Amino acid sequence: MFVAEVTGSVVVPQKHAKLTGRKLLAVRMLDRDGRMTESELIAVDTVGAGVGERVLVVKEGGSAAMAMGIDKPPANVVIVGIIDSVNLEATG
């Protein structure tokens, strides 16, 4: 599971039947300080996220299946939450 920022939407005119009616979004992973990394992925949105929002993302088949509510989903990266705030303890 990781924190990411939604950077765009992906329009797919033809897709797997299990993805019908589901929005696909481009997300860029964030580091511990909230800065965007170079890692960008396409994720299935299950919560109604939009561009510019910080989101909680799972990247694993079993978690994706549970979040999407279907067996054997054709995707393994799924947005499962919209983040209001992140409070991290100082380390060092």
Image: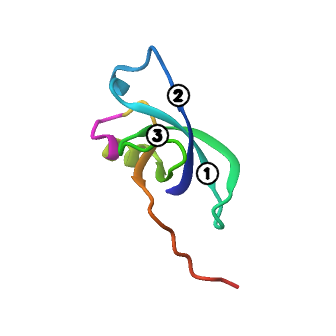
Report which residue position mark 1 lands on: 29
- Residue drawn at x 43%, y 19% is 15
Lower sequence index among marks 3 and 2: 2
Query: Is label 3 or label 2 in front?
Result: 2
The single residue placed furthest to the left in the displayed view is 69
Task: Name the spot of residue 24 as percent of width and height, x first.
Answer: 46, 32
Cα distance in 3D space between marks 3 and 1: 15 Å
Viewer-proximal residue among 49 and 89? 49
Query: Is label 2 or label 1 in front?
Result: 2
Figure quadrant of residue 6: top right
Q: Which mark is residue 11?
A: none
Cα distance in 3D space between marks 3 and 2: 16 Å
CB of mark 3 within 8 Å of CB of mark 2? no
Type of the residue with mark 3: Asn
Badge 1: how crowded within 10 Å, few (<14), some, or many (20+)? Answer: many
Figure quadrant of residue 35: bottom right
Type of the residue with mark 2: Val
Can you say which quadrant of the picture contains the C terminus?
Answer: bottom right
Report which residue position mark 2 lands on: 10
Residue 45 in the magenta stretch? The answer is no
**Residue segment shown in magenta:** 67-72
- Residue drawn at x 48%, y 53% is 55
Badge 2: how crowded within 10 Å, few (<14), some, or many (20+)? Answer: few
SS class of the residue under badge 1? strand
Cα distance in 3D space between marks 2 and 1: 17 Å
SS class of the residue under badge 2? strand
Report which residue position mark 3 lands on: 76
- Residue drawn at x 63%, y 62% is 34
Lower sequence index among marks 2 and 1: 2
